[in-house]
Image (cartoon, grey):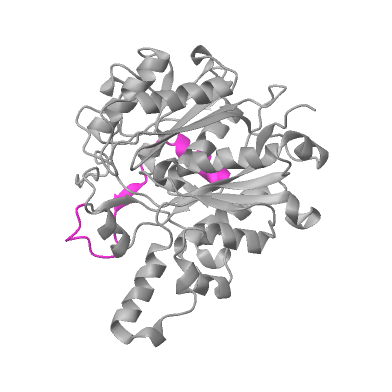
Amino acid sequence: MSARRSVITGIGVVAPTGTGVAEHWRRTLERVGRIGPIDRFGTDRLPARLAGHVVDFDETEHIDSKLRVQTDRWTWLALAAGRLALDDAALDPSAHDPFDLSVVTASASGGNHFGQREIHNLWKEGPASVTAYQSIGWFYAASSGQLSIREQLKGACGVLVAEGAGGLDALAQARRLIARGTGAVVVGGTEAPLSPYAMACHASLSTLSDDPDPDRAYRPFAPDSTGQVLGEGGAMVVVEDAGWAAERKAPPPYAEVLGTASTHDAHHPAEPAPDHRQLARAIREATARAGLTADRIDVVFADGAGDRVRDRRETDALVEVFGRRGVPVAVPKTATGRLSSGGAALDLSWAALALAHDVVPPSVNLEATDADELDLVTEARRGTGLRTALVVARGAGGFNSAAVLGLPEGGGRRAV
C-alpha cells in the first residue's frame, strides 16, 4: 500500500495581518507593519512597549457567551482560526466519523490574561471568588480541548510545547496521525501574551527589543537589530490525507507537507547554543525526508529571532546548507512580531499561500543590503515558479524545527 500523503486544504488566520485567509494575504502583500504601542495597560515599568496586535477581532462573533466565560483570549483566537480553517477546507465535521478527525495545537504560555484575573481575585477576595474554570482556562491544552469539543474532533488530539518551534512540531504530529490512518487534523497555534502578567514573565528576556520606534524595533538579520517584538494571534490549518480529501471532494490543496524534522541544542535553558549545528541538522533532515536536495528548495521562511547572536546562528546554518545568497529568505513576520507558538503556524500559512499564488511575500522594515550573506526578500517576488518552501522555527531553550512544503501532486495552484 502506498504511503499516505498529507496536504493542506484549509487555512484559518487570526493575526495582526488580519482575520481570515484572504484578508491576511492581502495585507501581507501591502508590506505595511502591524506593530504598534501597547495600549491595553500601562507599560512604564516594562522593558518593551510595542507589540503586534490583533485588531478588529470581535470575539462575540466567533465564541458564544458561555464559552467566553470559561476561556482565555488565546483560546478564542484558536477557536476562531480553527473554524475559519474548516470553512476554508469546506470540511463539515458532522458529515464524517468524529474519530476520523483530530486536533493538535502548540502553546507556549497558555491563558495568560485568564490566569492573571483569577490569581488577582484569589489574592484580593479569597478562594470563593475564583471560578471553577481556573483549573482549565489557563492550561496549555485548553485550546485543543475546546476545539475538540466544539467541532467534535474525537480522534487522537494533543498539544505540543516547544515555544516558537511548537507550530512545526504540531504539524509533524499531524502528519504522523495521518500516516496512521486519521483522515484530517486541525493543526496550528495561537498566542495572547499581551497582558501585564505575561509581559512581566517576558521582562527578563534579554532578546526583547526596547526600541520605541515600530519601524525599527524588530529587524531580524539587520546589523543594528535590537531584539524581538512580541505579538498575538496565529493560524490553524487543516491537514488531510490526500486520498481522503479527494474522496470527500475537498477544494484543491494549497500545498503538500513533504518533510519535517526537529532537533535540540541541549545547551542551556535560555541562552543560545555556541554554534548552529543542530539548527542546520534540522534543516538538512527535513529536506532529506522530503526527498529533496538543498538546491531544490525555492524559498526559506526564516525564524528571524531579531537578536544578533541568534540571527548569526541562523545565517550560518542557512549558508552552510544553501550557500551564500543561495536561496531567497523571507521574513514576513517582521510585520507582526514574533507570535511564539503562533508564529510557526502563521509562517506555514504564508508558505502555503506563497506556493498557491507563486508569490514570495515581502518582509517589512528591512533592506536587501541588511544581510550580505542572505538573499532577503524585501519586496514581493511574483511568478518565480515556486515549487517548494522551507519553514524554519526555533524556540527558547534550544528547540529547532523545520518543515518542507511543496506544490500538491499534479502541480496545480489554488488561489485565495
Q: Nearer the viewer, residue 23 or 282?
A: 282
Left or right of residue 372, residue 248 in this image: right
Tell me which residue sits at (24%, 31%) in the image.
309
Left or right of residue 141, residue 185 in this image: right
Q: Nearer the viewer, residue 14 or 111?
A: 111
The N terminus - image quarter: top right
| Residue at far left of view | 45
Tell me which residue sits at (43%, 45%) in the image.
162
Left or right of residue 181, residue 347 in this image: left
**Residue 31 sits in which quadrant?**
top left
User: Quick check: 326 above or below 406?
Assistant: above
Tell me which residue sits at (54%, 68%) in the image.
60
Number of residue marks = 0
**Residue 198 sits in which quadrant?**
bottom left
In the image, residue 37 lies in the stretch drawn in magenta: yes
Visible in this render: residue 32? no
Visible in this render: residue 332? yes
Q: Nearer the viewer, residue 98 or 36?
A: 98
In the image, residue 401 lies in the stretch drawn in magenta: no
| Residue at far right of view | 247
Q: Position of residue 333 (x, y in %)?
A: 40, 38
The C terminus - image quarter: top right
Q: Position of residue 408 (x, y in %)?
A: 67, 27
Which segment is the magenta one?
A: 21-47
Left or right of residue 211, residue 182 in this image: right
Q: Position of residue 393 (x, y in %)?
A: 42, 35
User: Quick check: 248 above or below 127?
Assistant: above
Tell me which residue sits at (25%, 36%) in the image.
307
Q: Position of residue 150 (x, y in %)?
A: 65, 63
